Image: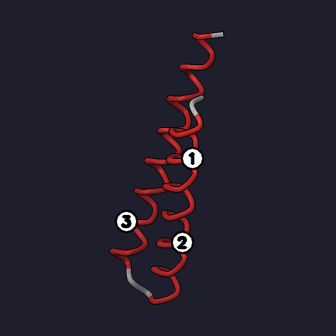
Amino acid sequence: MSDKEKGRAKAEQVKGRLKEMVGRALGNERLTAEGRAEKAKGNAREAKEKIKDVFKG
């Protein structure tokens, strides 16, 4: 996995987790949903990079 993509995936996961926690704390469903979506996007990016590594190696 390229370091750049790995970092981007982790950043999206963390940002999503934070948004989700803040949204829950404030009772803001929209922010919670945005956080979940961003976290899922980071997870998907990480999975994509792991699959690439499998086929390279």
> How far separated are the C-alphas under marks 3 and 1?
20 Å
User: Percent x, y for residue 56?
Assistant: 59, 11
At 63% across and 15% down in the image, what residue appears? 54
At 48% across and 38% down in the image, what residue appears? 45
- Eye-nearest disc, 3 or 1: 1
Residue 36: quarter of image = bottom left
At 54% across and 29% down in the image, what residue appears? 49
| Amino acid type at image mark 1 | Gly
Mark before the other along the chain sequence, 2 or 3: 2
Query: Are there few (<14), some (14-19), or many (20+) residues within 10 Å of tag 1?
Result: some
| Amino acid type at image mark 2 | Leu
The number of callouts visible is 3
User: Percent x, y for residue 30?
Assistant: 33, 74
In what element is the residue under mark 1? helix
| Amino acid type at image mark 3 | Glu
> How far separated are the C-alphas under marks 2 and 3?
10 Å
- Residue extending farthest to the front is 4
Mark before the other along the chain sequence, 1 or 2: 1
The residue at which mark 2 appears reads as: 18
In what element is the residue under mark 3? helix
- Residue extending farthest to the left is 30
- Residue extending farthest to the right is 57
The residue at which mark 1 appears reads as: 7
Q: How is the image coloured?
A: secondary structure
User: Percent x, y for residue 57?
Assistant: 66, 10
The residue at which mark 3 appears reads as: 34
Residue 38: quarter of image = bottom left
